[in-house]
């Protein structure tokens, strides 16, 4: 007959109890597999209905474009939020702000003061100082930034993409009729600039030699010239908002399109991805620190929605 010492018996009891807890938790959560992603509302009735971007520390910037009045947006603010949705700061005194991006030094850039003839690229330093670094013809609508702090800016009413280098040089990076209507813009892992056309729901790739090619068209989503709101790229996959049809789309770089969230109903309902609903999803950005998508809603009673991976 084998005799167990008190110390050994204690270890056996501890191990058995721990194993039982693991088994119970596993059975509650699908054998240890994390539940499917859900759409959640982070902030209800949120005034910021425009572009979304993620800062270098994981903070979330959401523009209050407002509504088109006369020659531009009626909104005046960009909100800075913690990843959990706490409002940390409100940048005020703007005019219909659209796209935003933050560089490695903490400077925030904003598409601002569009008047249908031209628009500004505003630089806001960490201390609050402001400077207009470019005035671009057309309607500069959104922006993205690369690891060298070069800005790339799409244009809603001109067929261009502009580049502003980290030392302030402004050039036309691409000029092509297919780019007229460009809003959503981001970069893939090869440095290609990806631009989504708001009017047509076409998505284009611009390589570093300026050559433009069609990635995909998201079919049957354009209603009254509202097609794709904004885009973000995660691991070389494009995620786009269907602003008029209330879906979130996933688009591969070889052109495969699928709906990943939304049921098409114009409501604000949380739940499993394809059962949840959005009201005119517009801005979208992915926070790599929390593996969370942040999505703004253009409608006046919208909110800030999230999808956690």
Image (cartoon, rainbow, N blue to C red):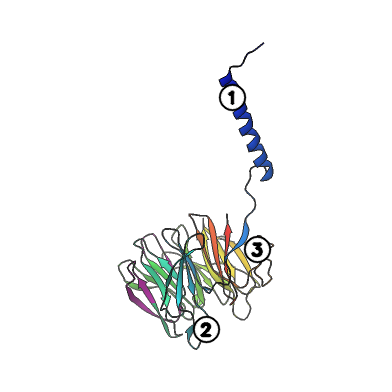
Residue shown at 33% from the left, 66% from the top = 166
Residue 140 is inside the magenta segment: yes
Q: Position of residue 157 (x, y in %)?
A: 48, 81
Q: Distance between the residues labelled 1 and 2?
A: 71 Å
Chief secondary structure of the magenta portion: strand
**Disc 2 secondary structure class:** strand
Which quarter of the picture shows residue 190?
bottom left
Q: How far apart are marks 1 and 3 (CA)?
A: 47 Å
Q: Give the range drawn in magenta.
A: 121-149
**Quadrant occupied by the C terminus:** bottom right
Residue 235 is inside the magenta segment: no
Q: Position of residue 44 (x, y in %)?
A: 58, 69
Residue under label 3, please give it. Answer: 270
Residue shown at 69% from the left, 71% from the top = 265
Is 8 left or right of 143, judged from the image as shown?
A: right
Check whether the beta carbons of the residues at disc 2 and disc 3 lie within 8 A of each other.
Answer: no
Q: Earlier in the sequence, mark 1 or mark 3?
A: 1
Q: Nearer the viewer, mark 1 or mark 3?
A: 1
Is 148 left or right of 224, judged from the image as shown?
A: left
State whether residue 141 appears in this view. Answer: no
Q: Earlier in the sequence, mark 1 or mark 2?
A: 1
Residue under label 1, please give it. Answer: 10
How many other residues sit within 10 Å of disc 1, few (<14), some (14-19) or many (≥20)?
A: few
Q: Position of residue 269 (x, y in %)?
A: 66, 66
State whether residue 152 appears in this view. Answer: yes
Q: How far apart are marks 2 and 3 (CA)?
A: 28 Å
Q: Nearer the viewer, mark 2 or mark 3?
A: 3
Residue under label 2, please give it. Answer: 68
């Amino acid at each position: 007959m084998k005799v167990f010492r008190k110390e050994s018996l204690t270890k056996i009891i501890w191990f058995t109890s721990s194993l039982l807890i693991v088994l119970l938790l596993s059975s509650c959560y699908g054998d240890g597999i994390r539940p499917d992603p859900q759409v959640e509302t982070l902030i209800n009735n949120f005034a910021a209905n425009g572009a979304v971007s993620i800062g270098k520390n994981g903070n979330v910037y959401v523009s209050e474009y407002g509504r088109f009045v006369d020659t531009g947006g009626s909104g005046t603010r960009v909100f800075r939020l913690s990843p959990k949705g706490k409002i940390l700061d409100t940048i005020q005194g703007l005019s219909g702000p659209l796209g935003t991006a933050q560089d490695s030094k903490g400077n925030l850039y904003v598409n601002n003061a569009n008047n249908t003839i031209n628009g500004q690229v505003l630089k806001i330093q960490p201390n609050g100082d402001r400077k207009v670094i470019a005035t671009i013809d057309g309607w500069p609508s959104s922006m993205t930034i690369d690891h060298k702090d070069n800005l790339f800016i799409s244009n809603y009413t001109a067929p261009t993409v502009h580049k502003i280098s980290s030392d302030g040089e402004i050039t036309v990076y691409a000029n092509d009729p297919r780019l007229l209507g460009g809003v959503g813009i981001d970069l893939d892992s090869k440095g290609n600039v990806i631009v989504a056309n708001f009017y047509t729901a076409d998505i284009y790739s611009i390589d570093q030699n300026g050559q433009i090619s069609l990635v995909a068209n998201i079919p049957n989503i354009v209603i009254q010239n509202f097609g794709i709101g904004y885009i973000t790229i995660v691991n070389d996959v494009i995620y786009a908002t269907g602003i008029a049809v209330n879906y979130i789309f996933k688009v591969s770089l070889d052109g495969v399109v699928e709906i990943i969230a939304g049921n098409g109903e114009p409501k604000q309902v949380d739940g499993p991805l394809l059962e949840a609903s959005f009201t005119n999803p517009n801005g979208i950005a992915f926070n790599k620190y929390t593996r969370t998508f942040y999505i703004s809603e253009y409608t006046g009673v919208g909110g800030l929605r999230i999808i956690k991976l």
